[in-house]
Image (cartoon, rainbow, N blue to C red):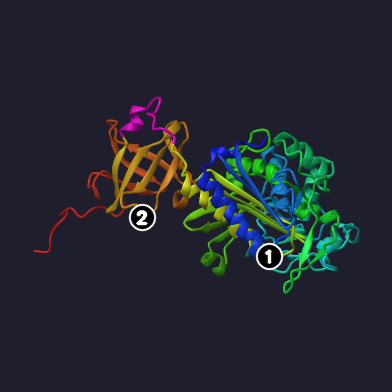
């Protein structure tokens, strides 16, 4: 169901339409269609087309290229969550004989396996998949170009291997597993491996003249898990909501959060650009906003899915041209327009339903040496510890149920936090991964490593 566009203000809707109109005109796209998601559902659809009359709507299929990789990654993470594999497993353990089995499943997901970017032979996106019937045809004689795990190098053959892994462990074709485990539970009934009417045709637009050439539509065969899918803005809007929030029928919120977390080493250029890659998802910093999602392209088509989890806004943009509009920029702009014009309403403040007095006792100011920190209580018995200055190491901590906590992010991710008490039950200090936090700077009554000078604090007189 398409939600009412009245949920966005008229000025916001016009700004969104203007942005895609500029993109279609300046990018010279035969057609361009877009959607915006807020609060987990589509709240705006728009399109522009060079054809007079009825333009494409949210139910018209376009080819989405490498956004397919995110769907494949979801299938692999489902296998992990079910205990059928570990992300640290070498591929050879589950899919022997590929010639690329040294790489781990996590490295394949994050494009750090060192594999080539493309398949050898004719341009695979513009030639029949029947030319590459076996994995050896996809990988070629020298599948590795880089040391395994050392650098990010985008690899389409890597996702072909992941699709084959899914088939091996499920005992069914990738397409069937995808439909049964992801498309049907999420209601994505207009997403398919083959085009279903109504669908757009793919075009190449001449770079120096306003004329077009139809692009061939090839079945990618073995390469399908890397880029085969067709979809609509309405289906991808629902998929974006899933990637932001999770759905226990497919993947838990913790697992989709893991997918959105950078997992590949960044090169210098990536650091400057603010780009990274997670487990089947692209990550970027743009205009001070953290965006996740994926882009896609195949001859005749461009696609982009962009999500700002913090703003609870996502955008989908599809076009039927080989090159032209920069859909990543368009998607980011659509998110920004909504997030700035109609910022997310914060949840109402509510007091904690209950509090442990032993934990409440720890709230307040602490010092690591001379660095001032504040400890605050969070939900479900957790705490946060952050510098009072706002800069430096901080983290939220998950309660372990035994009076200790485990760090969730940053420098302290995975590190243990506990309150150390004196024989009389009073709190002596906090121990965080061997760091001693005291109520006063270098508290002489606490076991500060190296001790505290007995003469205490002094001036220069």
What residue do we see at 71% from left, 45% from top? 57
Image quarter in which the N terminus is found: top right
Image quarter for residue 7? top right
Is 353 in the magenta?
yes
Q: Which residues are magenta?
A: 347-361
Can you give x and y, in whole percent of width and height, for residue 416 in the image?
44, 43
Image quarter in which the C terminus is found: bottom left
Residue lying farthest to the bottom in this orientation: 208
Callout count: 2
Cα–Cα span, label 1 and label 2: 42 Å
Can you give x and y, in whole percent of width and height, for residue 424 in the image?
27, 30
Q: Is residue 431 left or right of residue 339?
A: left
Q: Is residue 77 visible?
A: no
Residue lying farthest to the front in this orientation: 52
Decide which of tag 1 and tag 2 comes sooner along the chain. Answer: 1
Query: Front-most of 264 and 204?
Result: 204
What residue do we see at 22% from left, 47% from top? 444
Q: Is residue 338 above or below residue 298?
A: above
Q: Which mark is residue 391?
A: 2
Can you give x and y, in whole percent of width and height, for residue 117 in the image?
73, 65
Q: Which mark is residue 199?
A: none
Is 131 in the magenta?
no
Q: Is residue 201 visible?
A: yes
- Graded by Cα atoms within 10 Å as few (under 14), some (14 to 19) or many (20 or more), the crowding at tag 2 reads few
Give the labeled residue for mark 1: 324
- For the residues carrying marks 1 and 2, which lies nearer the camera in this image? 1
Query: Front-most of 248 and 349?
Result: 349
Q: What secondary structure is marked by label 1?
A: loop
What residue do we see at 37% from left, 27% from top? 355
């Amino acid at each position: 169901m398409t939600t009412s566009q009245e949920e966005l203000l008229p000025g916001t809707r016009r700004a969104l339409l203007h942005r895609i109109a500029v993109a279609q005109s300046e990018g010279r796209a035969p057609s361009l269609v877009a959607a915006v998601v807020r609060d987990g559902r589509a709240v705006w659809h728009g399109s522009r087309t060079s054809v007079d009359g009825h333009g494409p709507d949210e139910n018209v299929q376009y080819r989405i290229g490498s956004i397919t990789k995110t769907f494949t990654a979801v299938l692999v993470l489902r296998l992990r969550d079910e205990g059928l594999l570990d992300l640290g497993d070498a591929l050879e353990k589950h899919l022997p004989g590929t010639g690329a089995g040294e790489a781990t499943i996590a490295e394949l997901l994050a494009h750090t396996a060192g594999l080539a970017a493309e398949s050898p032979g004719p341009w695979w996106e513009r030639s029949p998949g029947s030319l590459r019937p076996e994995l050896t045809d996809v990988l070629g004689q020298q599948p590795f170009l880089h040391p395994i795990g050392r650098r990010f190098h985008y690899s389409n053959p890597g996702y072909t291997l992941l699709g084959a892994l899914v088939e091996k462990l499920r005992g069914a074709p990738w397409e069937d597993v995808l439909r049964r485990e992801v498309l049907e539970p999420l209601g994505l009934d207009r997403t398919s491996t083959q085009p279903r009417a109504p669908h757009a045709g793919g075009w190449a637009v001449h770079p120096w003249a306003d004329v077009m050439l139809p692009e061939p539509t090839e079945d990618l065969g073995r390469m399908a898990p890397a880029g085969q899918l067709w979809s609509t803005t309405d289906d991808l809007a629902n998929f974006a909501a899933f990637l932001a929030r999770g759905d226990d029928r497919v993947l838990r919120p913790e697992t989709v959060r893991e997918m959105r977390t950078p997992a590949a080493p960044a090169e210098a250029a990536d650091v400057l650009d603010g780009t990274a890659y997670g487990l089947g998802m692209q990550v970027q910093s743009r205009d001070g906003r953290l965006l996740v999602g994926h882009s896609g392209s195949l001859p005749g088509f461009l696609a982009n899915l962009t999500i700002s989890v913090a703003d609870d806004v996502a955008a989908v943009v599809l076009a039927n041209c080989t090159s032209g509009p920069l859909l990543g920029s368009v998607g980011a702009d659509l998110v920004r327009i909504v997030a700035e014009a109609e910022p997310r309403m914060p949840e109402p403040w509510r007091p904690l339903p209950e509090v442990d007095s032993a934990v409440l006792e720890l709230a307040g100011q602490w010092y690591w040496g001379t660095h001032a920190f504040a400890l605050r209580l969070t939900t479900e018995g957790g705490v946060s510890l952050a510098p009072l200055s706002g800069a430096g190491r901080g983290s939220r901590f998950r309660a372990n149920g035994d009076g200790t906590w485990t760090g969730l992010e940053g420098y302290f991710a995975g590190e243990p936090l506990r309150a150390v008490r004196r024989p009389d039950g009073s709190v002596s200090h906090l121990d965080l991964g061997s760091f001693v936090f005291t109520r006063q700077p270098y508290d002489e009554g606490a076991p500060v490593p190296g001790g505290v000078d007995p003469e205490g604090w002094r001036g220069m007189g």
